[in-house]
């Protein structure tokens, strides 16, 4: 007899196309945030908005490599470090370190 196993729903996950970034004061950079198996976009924030701010957000972006996600543009405000954090409530989170020099 065959035993039927319930299919597991794929777990939501979130990721960035950037591992780390160094910026000069006033310089901007755009990073792609990708959510899988989740209908809404991730919550994105800077853990040190005095050092790095999120300037803009494009919800439906496709990169040259064909990856789709949300494009966030950040700007370095003053020397220091900040993490840009994307999170799916109660599920997953991803971040990358930004160093402003």
Image (tube, grey):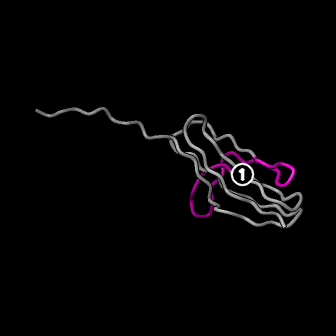
Q: Report if residue 51 lies within the magenta region.
A: yes
Residue 45: % across, % down: 74, 45
Quadrant location of the C terminus? bottom right
Q: Is residue 88 left or right of residue 52?
A: left
Q: Residue furthest left?
A: 1
| Residue density around tag 1, few if under 14, some if 14–19, many if 20 or more, within 10 Å | many
Q: Is residue 63 above or below residue 13?
A: below
In front: 72, or 96? 96
Residue at 70% across / 52% down in the picture? 71
Q: Residue furthest front?
A: 80
In front: 17, or 21? 21
Residue 75, located in which quarter of the rendered image?
bottom right
Residue 87: % across, % down: 63, 42
* Residue bearing the label numbered 1: 84
Secondary element at image label 1? strand
Residue at 83% across / 51% down in the picture? 53
Q: Which residues are magenta?
A: 46-70
Quadrant location of the N terminus? top left
Residue 6: % across, % down: 30, 32
Q: Report if residue 11 lies within the magenta region.
A: no
Number of residue marks: 1
Residue at 43% across / 40% down in the picture? 10
Q: Is residue 6 left or right of residue 100?
A: left
Q: What secondary structure characterizes most of the magenta part?
A: strand
Residue 11: % across, % down: 47, 40
Residue at 79% across / 55% down in the picture? 74
């Amino acid at each position: 007899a065959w035993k039927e196993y319930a299919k597991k729903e794929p777990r939501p996950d979130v990721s960035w196309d950037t591992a780390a970034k160094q910026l000069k004061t006033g310089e901007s950079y755009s990073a792609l945030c990708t959510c899988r198996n989740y209908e809404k976009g991730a919550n994105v924030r800077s853990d040190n908005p005095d050092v790095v701010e999120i300037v803009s957000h494009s919800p439906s972006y496709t990169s040259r490599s064909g990856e789709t996600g949300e494009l966030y543009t950040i700007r370095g405000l003053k020397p220091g470090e900040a993490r840009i954090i994307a999170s799916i409530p109660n599920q997953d989170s991803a971040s990358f370190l930004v160093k402003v020099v």
